[in-house]
Amino acid sequence: MNIRKGDTGVGLASEAEVRLQPDPFLNELTNMFERTTEKGSVWVTLKHSSDKSKVQRNKMKTVGEKIEYRCLIRATDGKKTISTMVGAKDHQRFQSSYATILKARMTALKKRERKDKRKAADSDKKADSKKRSSAAKKTSK
């Protein structure tokens, strides 16, 4: 196998990419996150795909057949690559399960410090009213 400089080999056909059903994919994704808790990363990519070649899609377009697009989801930890295809019908259920997994596994993220919007808006209003009242006093003198 020839690999060019800078090529990670993740997308090569010779590497074993396992295509799973959505539920086993989510289970395996959870396992990947658990394996990389101490050291490592997990990369997840989502891609709009019809799972057909360009020639097949063009033939279907000329005949007038409707092409069903699906979402191709791939995950890798650098050693193992898994993937699944999710259709429009299953997308909502898959997305909620996927979001739950991400929320549970992103524990190392720090919360952002936010100003209380109400307090910030009130202080801005007070400052504006003080400027207006002082400007009105100057013009009335």
Image (spheres, rainbow, N blue to C red):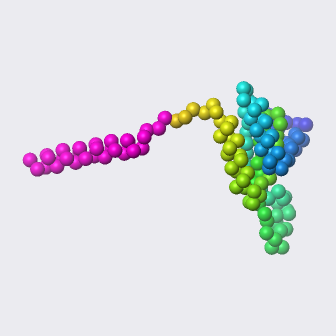
Q: Residue at x 80, y 49 (%)?
A: 22
Residue 4 shows up from this direction: no
Residue range (magenta): 113-141
The residue drawn where x is 8% and y is 47% is 141
Q: Is residue 139 magenta?
A: yes
Residue 77, relative to residue 61: is it above or below? above
Residue 104, image x and y in percent?
67, 38
**Residue 78 at what x, y percent from top left?**
79, 34
Q: Quadrant of residue 3?
A: top right
Q: Residue furthest top?
A: 38
In depth, the one of 100 and 44 nearer the eye is: 100
Q: Tell me the quarter of the image containing the N terminus.
A: top right
Instruction: From the top left corner, tell me how far across and down residue 50 is, in percent.
Output: 79, 59
Main structural element of the magenta stretch: helix, strand or loop? helix
x and y, in percent, of residue 33 in the image: 74, 35
* Residue 136 counted in the magenta span: yes
Q: Is 4 rendered above or below residue 48?
A: above
Q: Residue at x 82, y 43 (%)?
A: 82
Whether residue 16 sits left or right of residue 74 in the image: it is right
Task: Spot the residue most to the left.
Answer: 141
Residue ID at (85%, 68%): 59
